[in-house]
């Protein structure tokens, strides 16, 4: 049986290095024995003759030896696990981390023979863009925006490996430019479109108010659907719905003023833990009144994710069965932001209200009336 090392040295990036101390006949000092970043056996003189002082000196020797050395043998799984550990420690949301993991999975699919992130060169990163752009999801070729997202997330992942985990020294995606594509304006939901969806839901579910209330609140304050499903009763105060930093994407508390009637209805509907937690019991009751006891038994206890998934599935079914022009629930957020712009509210102010970065709001959410803007420019030039 090989000798088990007596000690563990934890590196600044979280890696743990097992080591032992030994003496030699040709020296009075203790030597620290360990495997370096490239898995080579190392023996370094601690310069200490007392064992307790050698124990204190050994980790410093190991940290210095590892500094700036990229472990070429780090596998994809090892590197991803290390990245996730660091991201989790920094309190990144699980959904955000998953996006980086999915991008890494796409990179591994393009280069299946690569052992780990250190194998990817800048030339391969450029090649990834080309090959990824030709891939398909089902019968449909991946959109340039999807490829753009992959490149952005991979660059972020490599920055974590370089700057936070300190296991790599180069980001091969740093200078890769995203594919160019025509930017389409955000989908704006017309009042009649929103009304049609709500009427369909009420007809389908025996005038059940909860789904309609959810959509009306979302359309009014332009919040994210996950934030709304996670709202708690104590977040309803003084005519406002407060979103806590724990539930918002940007980790900033936000207060949204509601119309009095909508606020009162939310207060009346709120359960003890979540505002919309009556969803499960009410859905179960509808199934029972329909005589669909088997469906009633499948309804599980409330979670924000269950309500979010249910309403998204209902919206998909609405468009599938009616053939109406499609929109996503998230388009209600863009619609609210565009309404704010049309009302003359500065983007920076609106960004605070909607919990969005101003640059992101301009790029992805606001739908400018380009014809009106052009008319304004030429009118001024003609003066």
Image (cartoon, grey):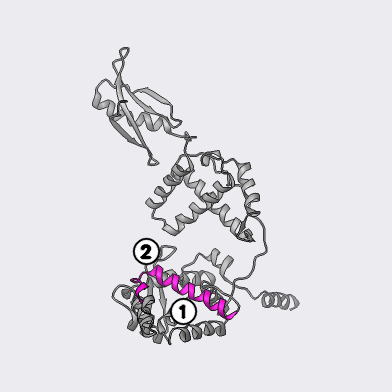
Seen from the viewer's position, the closer of residues 333 and 75 is: 75
Residue lying at 51% horizontally and 71% vertically, measured from the top left = 330
Residue 83, visible in the rendered structure: yes
- Whole-percent x and y of residue 25? 30, 12
Q: Which residue is mark 1?
A: 215
Q: Residue at x 30, y 25 (%)?
A: 3
Vertical order, 264 against 182 (above or below): below
Q: How many C-alpha atoms fall within 10 Å of the one at disc 1: few (<14), some, or many (≥20)?
A: some
- Tag in front: 1 or 2: 1
* Quarter residue 324 falls in: bottom right
Viewport quadrant of the C terminus: bottom right
Is 294 in front, or is 6? 294
Task: Please determine whether, in this image, residue 353 is positioned above or below residue 39.
Answer: below
Label 2 secondary element: loop
Give the crowd class for mark 2: few <14, some 14-19, many >=20 residues within 10 Å.
few
- In reply to whether residue 312 is colored magenta, the answer given is yes
Per the image, label 1 sits on a secondary structure element best described as: helix
Q: Position of residue 337 (x, y in %)?
A: 53, 74
Q: How many marks?
A: 2
Q: Earlier in the sequence, mark 1 or mark 2?
A: 1
> Is residue 173 covered in magenta?
no
Magenta span of residues:
296-323
**Which of the pair 382/32 is nearer the observer?**
32
Please tell me which residue lies in front, 363 or 124. Answer: 124
Q: Alpha-carbon distance for marks 1 and 2? A: 22 Å
User: What residue would you read off at disc 2?
Assistant: 246
| Picture coordinates of residue 372, whole percent (x, y) | 67, 78
Residue sitting at the far right:
382
* Above or below 136: residue 128: above
């Amino acid at each position: 049986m090989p000798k088990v090392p007596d000690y563990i040295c934890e590196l600044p990036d979280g890696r743990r290095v097992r080591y032992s101390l030994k003496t030699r006949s040709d020296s009075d000092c203790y030597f620290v024995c360990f495997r370096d970043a490239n898995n080579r056996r190392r023996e370094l003189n601690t310069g200490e003759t007392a064992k307790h002082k050698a124990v204190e000196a050994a980790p410093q020797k190991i940290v210095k030896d590892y500094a700036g050395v990229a472990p070429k043998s780090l596998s994809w799984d090892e590197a991803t696990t290390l990245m996730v550990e660091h991201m989790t420690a920094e309190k990144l949301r699980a959904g955000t981390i998953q996006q980086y993991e999915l991008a890494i999975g796409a990179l591994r699919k393009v280069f299946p023979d690569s052992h780990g992130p250190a194998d990817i060169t800048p030339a391969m990163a450029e090649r990834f863009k080309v090959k990824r752009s030709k891939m398909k999801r089902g019968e449909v070729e991946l959109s340039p925006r999807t490829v753009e997202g992959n490149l952005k997330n991979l660059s972020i992942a490599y920055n974590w490996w370089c700057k936070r985990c300190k296991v790599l020294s180069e980001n091969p995606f740093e200078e890769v430019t995203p594919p160019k594509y025509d930017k389409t304006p955000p989908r704006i939901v017309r009042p009649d479109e929103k009304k049609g969806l709500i009427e369909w839901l009420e007809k389908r579910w025996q005038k059940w108010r909860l789904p309609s209330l959810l959509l009306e609140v979302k359309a009014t304050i332009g919040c994210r659907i996950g934030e709304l499903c996670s709202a708690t009763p104590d977040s309803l105060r003084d005519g406002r719905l407060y979103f806590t930093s724990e539930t918002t994407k940007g980790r900033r508390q936000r207060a949204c003023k509601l119309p009095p009637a909508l606020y009162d209805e939310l207060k009346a509907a709120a359960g003890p833990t979540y505002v919309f937690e009556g969803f499960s019991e009410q859905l179960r009751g509808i199934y029972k009144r329909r005589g669909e006891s088997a469906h009633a038994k499948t309804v599980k206890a409330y979670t924000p994710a269950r309500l979010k998934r249910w309403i998204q599935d209902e919206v998909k079914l609405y468009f599938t069965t009616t053939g109406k022009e499609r929109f996503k629930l998230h388009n209600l957020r863009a619609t609210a932001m565009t309404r704010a712009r049309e009302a003359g509210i500065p983007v920076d102010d609106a960004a605070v209200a909607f919990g969005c970065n101003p640059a992101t709001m301009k790029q992805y959410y606001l739908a400018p009336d380009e014809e009106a803007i052009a008319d304004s420019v030429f009118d001024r030039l003609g003066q």
